[in-house]
Image (tube, helix red, strand yellow):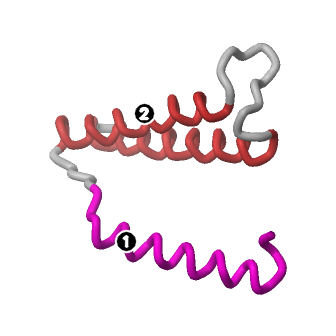
Amino acid sequence: MNKREYLLTKLIEECLEVAQRATKAQTFGINEVEPGQKLDNTERLNLEWNDLLATVELLHEEEGISLFGDSELIRRKKQKILQFMNYSREQGCLA
């Protein structure tokens, strides 16, 4: 495995950790503090998000792979999410 492959693997890992923490927040509540932990799910999600951002920065610094926000693509995606959210509501799946 070379450095690029390692960093891409870390990117996958960090994405999965963000997903797992978001699932915990969904399942147990955004303000829930897991027994034995000091931070709530919002704080822990933020930690995982920052781990992901650090990995993205390393990919850029070490391998020249630039992942960046594009305001137009973001605007379109938000519009699409809201469209499907409304559809879900119409189907009775979202309150």
What is the span of residues highlighted in magenta in the rendered image?
69-95
Q: Is residue 29 above or below residue 72?
A: above
Q: Element at badge 1?
A: helix
Q: Residue at x 43, y 32 (%)?
A: 51
Type of residue at label 1? Arg
Q: Residue at x 51, y 40 (%)?
A: 13
Q: Are marks 1 and 2 in contact (CB under 8 Å)?
A: no
In-image side of 28 versus 66 (left or right): right
Type of residue at label 2? Asn
Q: Which residue is mark 2?
A: 50
In-image side of 66 versus 37 (left or right): left
Q: Number of labelled discs?
A: 2
Magenta-span inclusion, residue 79: yes
Q: Nearer the viewer, residue 94 or 68?
A: 94
Measured in 3D between alpha carbons, the distance from the residue under mark 1 to the one under mark 2, in whole angstroms, is 22 Å
The quadrant in which the C terminus is found is bottom right
Q: Which residue is mark 1?
A: 75
Q: Residue at x 27, y 53 (%)?
A: 67
Residue 55 appears at what percent x and percent y? 35, 36
Residue 72 appears at what percent x and percent y? 28, 72
